[in-house]
Amino acid sequence: MARSPEVFVRPVTMTEGRRLQRIGRTASDPVKLRRAIVGADAVAGPGAPDITHLLDCSQGYVAG
């Protein structure tokens, strides 16, 4: 069985990190909120399988 490709997340700047935090606190749009959470989790270090398990979503959603 082929191994699934890894998802690469570049380091974020302080400004980008603050923006992700702000979106996480203030977003009224659930899609925007979830994407901010995925981004913040990805930067924090857990892999895509861990994020998909935590948020109960597909790997395609996390990788997209």
Image (cartoon, rainbow, N blue to C red):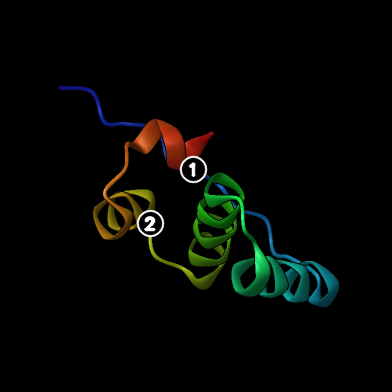
- Rendered image quadrant of residue 25: bottom right
- Circle 1 residue: 7
At a point 38% along the width and 56% down the height, the residue shown is: 47
- Rendered image quadrant of residue 23: bottom right
As drawn, the residue found furthest toward the top would be 1
Callout 1: few (<14), some (14-19), or many (20+) C-alpha neighbours within 10 Å? few
- Circle 2 residue: 47
The alpha-carbon separation of the residues under discs 2 and 1 comes to 8 Å
From the viewer's perspective, is 53 left or right of 10?
left
Q: Which one is earlier in the sequence, the residue at label 2 or at label 1?
A: 1
From this view, report whether residue 32 is shown above or below residue 17. Answer: above
Q: Position of residue 44 (x, y in %)?
A: 51, 72
At a point 77% along the width and 69% down the height, the residue shown is: 19
Judging from the image, what secondary structure is the residue with disc 1 in? Answer: loop
Q: Position of residue 24 (x, y in %)?
A: 60, 69
Judging from the image, what secondary structure is the residue with disc 2 in? Answer: loop
Callout 2: few (<14), some (14-19), or many (20+) C-alpha neighbours within 10 Å? some
From the viewer's perspective, is 62 left or right of 21?
left
At a point 32% along the width and 36% down the height, the residue shown is: 58
From this view, report whether residue 45 is shown above or below residue 9. Answer: below
